[in-house]
Structure formats: structure tokens, C-alpha cells
Image: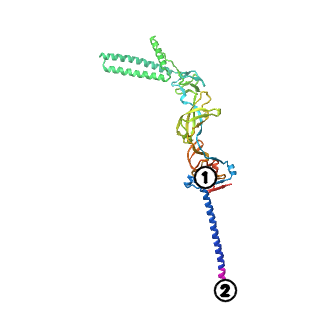
Amino acid sequence: MKKFVIIFSILALAFCNGGRDASQADNHEHGDASHTHEGETAQHSHEGEEEQPIQEAEEAGHEHQHLDVTPAKQKAWGVRVGLVEPQRLSSRIVLPGVISLNENKTAHITSFVHGQIAKLSVDLGSKVRKGQTIVVINSPEFAQLQADFLQARASYNLSHIEYERAQFLWKQNAIGENELLRRQAEHEKFSSEYGALGSKLHSLGISHEQIEELIQKCDLVEEEEYKCDVANPNLSVQAPLAGTVIFRDVILGQHIEPEKVLFTVSDLSTLWVVLDAYEKDIPFISKESVIHIYSDLYSDRHFHGKITYISDLLDEKLRTLKIRVEIDNSAGDLKPNMYIRGIIENAASEEELLAVSDEAVQNLEGEKVVFVQEKSDVFAVRHVRLGNKVGPNRIILAGLEKGERIVTKGAFTLKSEITKGTFGHAHVH
């Protein structure tokens, strides 16, 4: 009996402890169920907040990300908010550049012959006319060329007479056809030599009138039965265009070689401006673009220009394109090698387009986003599809609506903050 009482007590004690454990387990299960229900309610409430008008980008499966930023922190970060409004866009492109000579109106003066400088008629800064003599070169080579020309002319004249006489004799059957052809060939040979030497004189700047004067002098001497020694060794070098002498590298009495640059003459009334256009600006630049040139020396003035050339090659290192502009410099205020700025103003678009500042658009995980202000301290990430860049603005093709408020300044800071977290909702205090 005593043994039975002990066994019964043990069973009763075990039963009581098991009841408490079951009750605790049951309460624990109820507690978990209650917690799960609250979580589901909270999640449902959050989803309810998302049931606003769904944006096109979110329909594509983007996560709905928010960022809470207190007003104090917004001020510290320099966050600015503005309305998204349609606008007529116009671009303003600023390009760095330098002024250069108008190469179409610049000439390097050289000598085609060996010789010695006999006379200098101009100096640096001199204004010259087209055809004006600027230097005289004493050249035996030039004198010999004139003598060769006169000799070739005499041979030509003699061969011409003989050929005409041969034609007459052949018609009279006084000579054979072979003799006629021989004299014809000889005449053509002297004719070619005479013409070639005349062309060489022309290439040295000798005009037709000067050659005629040379021939007349020789004929006059021959009539007076003197030796034909009328070649002048002094070669006058003339300016090929009107302009200003901007370079000189010669002195009186100096011996010079052919192709040495003695002077440079340039018409400074027009100049070239060579601008560097960045790759991103190329689509907005054409020869029809209106451009103004500005110099720091004349801060209150601008100079009109016309784009005359746009390079077809992009600099592979600088990623820039050369733009050439021709500008009027009649007043002489601008100088070659001055640094300037070129500003291209493109006309406003005919239709109003939805656009935001380029600074408002950020790159988040490889996609373009802006920050939309949903509440005074809540900013949502909004994926957008972009169009062309026009000046400092980017056209918005999809993702935003007229009248929405977006971050126009400080968007990069918000992007940096939201990338620090691993959840779609971040808080910054």
C-alpha cells in the first residue's frame, strides 16, 4: 500500500508540471500568433500607403524606396525642392578657346632663289598693300634665268622663221617631207623651252608687263648692235595680300636660301577662334548656331562670330571637338593667342517639354532616378526615363507628372544616404 501511494504521488506531480508546460507553450503560441497578426497589420498598412497612383517605373518591378530626412538635416545638406513644370527649353553652351590668325588671309613671304638682301621696304607692324614690294634680293641666279629666257626666245624666233620657210619650200617641192618634219620638231622644242622659262619667271613674281619690258630692252640693244646684257639681278619680292607685317627674320645684306621665311603678312581685320567642344555638346552645335565671343579684357562686350568649320575628328584623349569661328576684328581689339570663351545660344523649343535640372537626376544601381517629396520630411525614389540633354536640363519622357515636387539640389547627398541602408525605408535624424 505504501508503495502504491508513492507511485501515485509521482504521477500526480508529473501531471501538474506537464500542465504548466503545456499552458506556457499554449500561451507562447498565442503570443506568437498575436505578434504575427500585428506584423501583418503593419505590413498591410504600409502596403496601403503604397496604394497611391502607381508610377510607370514601379509597375516595371522597382522597389518602392523612401528616405526620411528631418527639416534640420535638409537645411544642413542644402536640399532644395522645386516643382516639375513643362517649359520651352533653350540651351546655353560655354566653350573655351583661343584666338588665332585667319589662315586664309595670312602669307609667309619667302625667296625662290639664292641671293643677298639688297633692300628692305617694310618692318614689323607695317601695313602693306597687295603687290607692294617689301624686299629686294640681289641674285645672280635670277639674272641667269633672265638670260636663259632671252636666249630661249631668240632660239624660238629663229626656229619659227626656219619652220615657216620649210613649209614654203615643201610646197614648192624644194625639200622633202622629212626635212619639213625635222624643222617642225625643232621649232616645237624651242617653243616648249621658251614657254617653260617664261613660266619660271612668273613663279618668281615677274609679271607679263615686266617680261615685255625685258624683251623690249633686249630688242633695243640688238638694234643698236650691242651685246644683249640687260638682265637685272635684283628680284623684287611683293606682298601677295594686303595686311600687317607680323613676323620678320631678315636683315640688310644677309645671304638667304630659297624657301626661308623672311616675313609673314596677315590681314588682322578678321580672325579665327578655335573652340573646344565637349563630346556631350556635339548634338547641339551646327554651322547655323548663333555664337558670341567673350574676353575677360572686355567684360562688358561681346563679339559676333560665325561657325565656319566643325572638325570631323574627336580628340581621343581630351574627348573634345575643334570648332572654328570667324570673327570681325576691324577695331583691332582682339589679338591672336588670346584666351576667350564662346557661348552658343540655341533657340527655345517650339513645344513645352517636361524637364528637370541635370543635377536632380541621379544614377542609382545603374538606373536614373529623382527624389520626389511626398511629405515635408519624406522623399521617395522615382525611376525616370530620360530624353535629350538641353543646356543644364534633362527632358523627362516617363516617370514624373506635372506639379510634382522633386529635389533640385542636394539629390546626390540623398542618394548617398539611401545607398548606406539595406532596406527600402531609411531614417535620417
How many tags in the picture? 2
Q: Is residue 174 left or right of residue 286?
A: left
The percent position of residue 107, horizontal first and vertical second, equals: 54, 27
- Residue 75 in sight from this viewpoint: yes
Residue 136 sits above or below residue 285 on the image: above
Which image quarter holds the C terminus?
bottom right
What residue did someone put label 1 on?
A: 381
Residue at (44, 18) in percent of width and height: 151
Residues under numbered marks 1 and 2 in contact, where contact means CB atoms less than 8 Å apart: no
Which colour assignment does the render follow? rainbow
Going by the numbered disc 1, the residue's amino acid type is: Val
Q: In front: 408, or 398?
A: 398
Going by the numbered disc 2, the residue's amino acid type is: Val
Residue 190 sits above or below residue 297 on the image: above
What is the crowding at mark 1: few (fewer than 14 residues within 10 Å), some, or many (at least 20)?
A: many
**Part of the protein shown in magenta:** 5-14
Majority SS type along the magenta span: helix
12 drawn magenta: yes
Q: In front: 38, or 202?
A: 38
What residue did someone put label 2 on?
A: 5
The percent position of residue 115, horizontal first and vertical second, equals: 53, 23
